[in-house]
Image (cartoon, coloured by chain):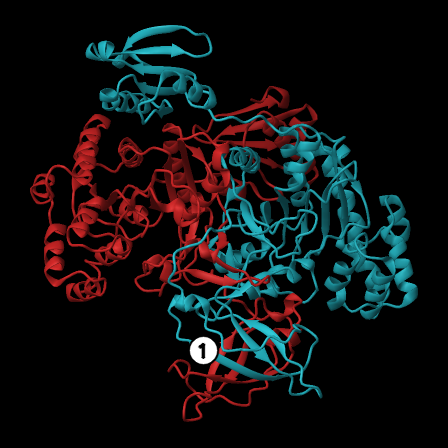
Chain colours: A cyan, B red
């Protein structure tokens, strides 16, 4: 609550006087050089909305930070709720994972890009009622701009593609690994930030693009030891729904909204789904048929329902045929219930799932051919996926596939005498100049301590700088794995 | 202004009725499911502060986003003011730079860490009036917590060290490369975010630590082609000032504040400096002497003034002696005017500068032995530096040392016939399985287009999948540098 101004808001439009305490926030807190009133009493008229409540009065409250001048008290040593520190052991895992993301992307010829983690809020506001929008981590900055910590990377990518315009040659094949934020209630240990690996293809209308994207994820899985018996991909196309909705006369601009509702099928009661679908103007009959089609798990059955002439069937057939040629047909299956929870998808959609059914979707993606025009750009066919860093680590843990990653240095260099610390520095520099990693002992420590540290950092060799040897330009080397020990001139030390 | 609620605030405590229009911001904008009044008129009593002004009335204003349901208009395709996109060409430079940061850190045996980019605001609020504090990018989140985008990494590191407590063995040698934010006026093209490379040593009280930190920066400079004739390090110690202030009877708790004032010497007029120093209780005489000492550029002269017995002189002498043994004594020089702008430094301070004097400091750091106790932890001796990604790139540009970094893939694979796209996928997969990078042409394109793309992605080979060869399990390969062309069985293609 530090830095907030408590305002007593009273209801003028409601019949009873009912004070509501709200916390209004300044674009920035008082110490940030804003001209704001030091003391503020506010009596406001408002339509009572049932929020807030409570009757705190005595409402002359000074902004705490303005007058703050005391020394700091003990701070909370944990990172803010829902966020993570990455101490070395966690950072090693993160680097291991990200390196696989990046190496696979490069193997497929994709170029790395990034965007600001703080974007204009408008970039993420769509009218479809997505979960991602309701959980936007948004603020107003000191220039009165509505900004948000990005909940996903695709809108920024679309923005950049529009900005680049004709200066780039299509297709673009881009990847990114970036932190994304969502403000959700902290249940079940879900976090408010995660890192997401994205690969996107801009400028290819054919299903070859989606097929390659899935191929890259399969390649990633294989590299980290995940097999087709651990995970699979459910694949469908938004065109299935679109063809059905057209059949039922549902207006095209309701399409995104219907998809979002259908994506909630396993999350909220089916009656709620039906009610929400009803609001969009779909008849009860149509809703029943729609829900039936969504349970279809075979492409042949779908073809019986939709007929063979539509794009949905054609796209899906091509995808399955390409999957065979890419070599991952055992990994994918048709599932009409997959629509994904983002409003902008227009064609093939897919999600990676664990076959034990214990975890949330591991990754998800699809085609979004019309996203650019919602931002005022010319549409370019596009598709991509997002792959978070949370569920995959849960899966690796479960399969006991998390790698053992210790620190590793080649040399630990130590002076045997305080006067030789400069000499040890010279030795460390010589080794580093040769490209050897060196942990230099910076204090005078007993040998026992040095051996303990050498073990902890997994040093390959211990290089000791002693008086007699150093006078001769030599050092003692102990190979820690074998115990082998020898003296060598510094210039000969490789 | 989207999502803000305009409130008409009137002065009750001032004699004249003078409406002030303020923008109050909700912890989140209305669409984010907060219970807030839809319409709000607020008449507030406030001590007039001269801020705001204007007389906008008609103050029943609906929060714009609540009723928003229209399609999106053209958005701003630029990233938010002061932030950057990283299209591939910029990302390659960023990766090149960061890889050098990381490789040097590992060469020195440091472990990588990271912290949340969004931290509790309290972590960064110190009472010394630092520039960094005045430019805090701060917000209130939806849980009414004061948070800030980190302006630097050291406070988070200190927080994590306290949290880890006795579970870690000292010394810690940690590095991080993370994005930092500061909300400053957008003059002279300065940005609101930059990436910073930090290296820190926790648990070493001796100057060997600072000496190694500077050695790592020198190693970095050398790797990227920057020499001692391009840059240098100015070195001093906060203990110089401390010994002077003790001499003048200035209370110890004014120390941080005095350092911040002195750090502004080249940024604001000297009379302003003197005035500010006067406020801290230093006599006019003492201020004059202080400013004289700060102009000292030789350690011998400083010793004449301070005498030889103090820690300041001893530390600095040791540092210069170690610099020689590390092999970078030509890079560093004593300069009493260096104090650095962060309140928490306690000992050696240093900054990297370009010898032409055109740029801001390239990097800076020092010892901060008492930071942990300001957060309620037990103090542990510590030192570190921050090295931003902005000034170094300016310097590299100026020296014409920016690397040429193009995209690079080993193969571009293309079907000569639409029906062979599946076959091309098989070829791409086979090559990728062998670790070869492949840009797969995902559409049916004329050969001319393919050659153009091959040139753009710097492909080493063009692999063509034609009908006749494929029936035989073969492909055509053209080595693009030599023009050499041959047919090969896919299984033999390395």
Rendered image quadrant of residue B26:
bottom right
* Residue B278 in view: yes
The residue under label 1 is A39
Q: Is residue B424 left or right of residue B149?
A: right
The picture places residue B481, in percent across and down from the top left corner, at: 43, 30
**Between B38 and B222, the one nearer to me in the picture:** B38
Q: How many marks?
A: 1
The picture places residue B427, in percent across and down from the top left corner, at: 63, 30
Residue furthest toward the right?
A: A285
Relative to B168, does residue B274 appear above or below in the rendering? below
Residue furthest toward the bottom?
A: B16
Q: Is residue A120 left or right of residue A273?
A: left
The picture places residue B315, in percent across and down from the top left corner, at: 21, 36
The picture places residue A109, in percent across and down from the top left corner, at: 54, 38
**Between B145 and B224, the one nearer to me in the picture:** B145
Pick the quarter of the image with the C terminus of chain B: top right
Rendered image quadrant of residue B67:
bottom right
Picture residue at 67% right of the left edge, 46% below the top: A189
Q: Is residue B272 left or right of residue A230?
A: left
């Amino acid at each position: 609550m530090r830095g907030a101004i408590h305002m007593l808001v009273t209801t003028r439009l409601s019949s009873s006087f009912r004070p509501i305490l709200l916390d209004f926030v300044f674009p920035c807190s008082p110490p940030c050089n804003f001209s704001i009133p030091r003391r503020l009493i506010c009596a406001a008229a408002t339509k009572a909305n049932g929020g807030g409540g409570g009757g705190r009065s005595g409402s002359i409250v000074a902004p705490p930070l303005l007058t703050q001048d005391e020394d700091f008290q003990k701070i909370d040593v944990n990172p803010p709720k829902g966020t993570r520190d990455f101490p070395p052991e966690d950072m090693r895992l993160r680097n291991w994972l990200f390196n696989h993301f990046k190496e696979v992307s490069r193997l497929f010829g994709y170029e790395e890009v990034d965007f600001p983690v703080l974007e204009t809020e408008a970039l993420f506001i769509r009218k479809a009622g997505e979960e991602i929008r309701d959980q936007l981590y948004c603020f107003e900055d000191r220039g009165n701009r509505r900004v948000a910590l990005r909940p996903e990377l695709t809108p920024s990518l679309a923005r950049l593609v529009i900005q680049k315009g004709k200066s780039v040659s299509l297709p673009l094949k881009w990847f990114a690994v970036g932190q994304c934020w969502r403000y959700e209630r902290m249940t079940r240990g879900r976090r408010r930030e995660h890192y997401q690996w994205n690969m996107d293809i801009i400028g290819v209308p054919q299903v070859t693009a989606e097929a390659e994207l899935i191929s890259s994820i399969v390649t990633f899985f294989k590299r980290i030891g995940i097999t087709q018996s651990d995970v699979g991909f459910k694949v469908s196309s938004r065109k299935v729904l679109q063809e059905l909705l057209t059949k039922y006369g549902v207006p095209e601009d309701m399409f995104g909204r219907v998809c979002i509702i259908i994506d909630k099928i396993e999350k909220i009661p089916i009656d709620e789904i039906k009610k929400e679908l009803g609001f969009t103007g779909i008849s009860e009959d149509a809703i029943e048929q729609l829900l039936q089609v969504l349970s279809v798990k075979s492409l042949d059955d779908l073809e019986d329902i939709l007929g063979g002439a539509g794009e949905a069937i054609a796209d899906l057939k091509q995808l399955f045929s390409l999957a065979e040629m890419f070599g991952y047909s055992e990994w994918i299956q048709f599932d009409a219930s997959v629509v994904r929870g983002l409003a902008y998808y227009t064609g093939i959609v897919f999600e990676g799932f664990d076959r034990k059914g214990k975890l949330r979707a591991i990754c998800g993606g699809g085609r979004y051919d019309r996203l650019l025009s919602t931002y005022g750009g010319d549409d370019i066919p596009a598709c991509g996926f997002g792959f978070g860093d949370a569920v995959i680590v849960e899966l690796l843990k479960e399969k006991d596939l998390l790698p053992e990653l210790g620190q590793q240095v080649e040399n630990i260099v130590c002076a045997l005498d305080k006067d030789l610390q400069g000499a040890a520095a010279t030795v460390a520099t010589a080794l580093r100049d040769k490209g050897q990693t060196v942990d230099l002992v910076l204090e005078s420590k007993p040998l026992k301590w040095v051996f303990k540290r050498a073990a902890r950092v997994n040093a390959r060799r211990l290089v000791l700088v002693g008086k007699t040897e150093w006078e001769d330009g030599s050092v003692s080397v102990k190979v820690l794995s074998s115990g082998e020990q020898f003296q060598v001139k510094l210039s000969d030390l490789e």
